[in-house]
Every structure is written in C-alpha cells, then in structure tokens.
Image: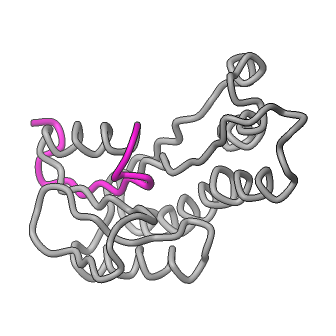
C-alpha cells in the first residue's frame, strides 16, 4: 500500500471529488482527515480510516483548530488535498455578487488558508505533498457554471 502509515488531510472530504480522494487514500493505507463543513461539530480524530472533522475553510480560526487537532493526534500531516469547493448552476448574468463572493471565499481563500497553515507544519519535516485539484483556464472558459470558473482557476498554483 502506497500510503501505509501516512496521514492525509482532504478538505471537502465528505462529498464529491473530495470523498473519492479520501476513499482512495484510505484504500492505499492512509489515515485520512476529512475536513468538511458538513462534518458534525463534535467529531474528533479518533480511530483510523476516514475521520471527519468539522472545518470551515473560510475561517482562519477553524483552519487553525483543524491543524492543531491533526498535530495533537498524529504529530504530522503527510499529504494535503485541497478539494473543498462550491459552485452554483446559475447563469452568469443572474449570479448575485454575494454568491460569487462566497465562491471566492471557499474556492480561493479556503485553499490559501488551509495550504498555508498545513505547509507551515509540513515545513518542519519532509517529505510532504500538497495537491490542489482545480480547473485549467481553458476548461473554466467552457464550464457549465461560469461564475465558479474564475475562483477555481485562480486557485491553481
């Protein structure tokens, strides 16, 4: 198993692409922290496999609590996958500014906050891996959900 004895952190890890990534890492032997806003607030990092942890990636205090809990329980994070993201299937001309700003907060700011906080911890030991799935600018241009395309494309390293 390629991820035996590894600790993975997957944002958005309880649904969609994030859940599929969390499941794949767990199948390969990793213990996976599934950081997700839909996780119960009382969730703890007990046990093994896929461990849900309530996290709002747009909130620095929530991200700090996530990293602190991971560090306290496991001592390290070996792999980070920033998969948390939102989008609405709204026509571009009908998308309210508040909805676009929420997409920016989750898809761009959330990626930044989690990656920065995790990288600070990862810098203390090596090797470590950060993965940022996202849209390429080309696919963003033909996306079925145009308002979501800029924040996802902007989150690409």
Locate residue 142 relative to residue 67 in the image: left or right: right
Task: Give x and y (percent) for residue 90.
Answer: 74, 36
Is 29 left or right of 33, judged from the image as shown? Answer: left
Q: Quadrant of the C terminus?
A: top right
**Residue 8's quadrant in the figure?**
bottom left
Q: Quadrant location of residue 146?
A: top right
For the point 55% across and 58% down, the residue is 115
Asked whether residue 15 is drawn in magenta, I would say yes
Looking at the rendering, the stretch of residues picked out in magenta corresponds to 1-16
Where's residue 65, x and y in %? 44, 82
In front of the other: 40 or 55: 40
Observer-nearest residue: 135 or 1?
Answer: 135
Q: How many marks?
A: 0
Query: Which residue is at 67% across, 44% downward?
Result: 155
What colouring does the structure picture have?
A: one colour
The residue located at (54%, 63%) in the rendering is 114
Q: Quadrant of the N terminus?
A: top left
* 18 lies above or below 99: above
Residue 147: x and y in percent read 78, 37
Q: Is residue 17 magenta?
A: no
Residue 62: x %, y % from top left: 51, 78
Report the residue at 41% width, 74% height from top: 67
In the displayed structure, 138 sits above or below 93; it is above
Q: Main secondary structure of the magenta part?
A: loop
81 horizontally vs 91: left or right: left
Check the image and report above or below for 23 versus 143: below
């Amino acid at each position: 198993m390629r991820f035996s004895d590894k600790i993975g952190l997957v944002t958005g890890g309880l649904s969609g692409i994030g859940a599929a990534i969390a499941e794949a890492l767990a199948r390969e032997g990793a213990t996976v922290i599934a950081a997700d806003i839909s996780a119960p607030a009382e969730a703890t990092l007990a046990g093994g496999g896929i461990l849900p942890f309530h996290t709002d990636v747009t909130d620095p205090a929530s991200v700090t609590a996530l990293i602190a809990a991971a560090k306290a329980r496991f001592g390290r994070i070996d792999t980070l996958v920033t998969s948390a993201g939102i989008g609405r299937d709204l026509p571009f001309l009908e998308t309210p500014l508040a909805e676009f700003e929420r997409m920016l907060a989750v898809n761009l700011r959330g990626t930044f906050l989690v990656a920065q906080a995790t990288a600070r911890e990862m810098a203390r030991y090596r090797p470590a891996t950060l993965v940022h799935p996202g849209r390429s600018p080309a696919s963003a241009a033909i996306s079925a959900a145009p308002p979501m395309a800029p924040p996802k494309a902007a989150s690409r390293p």
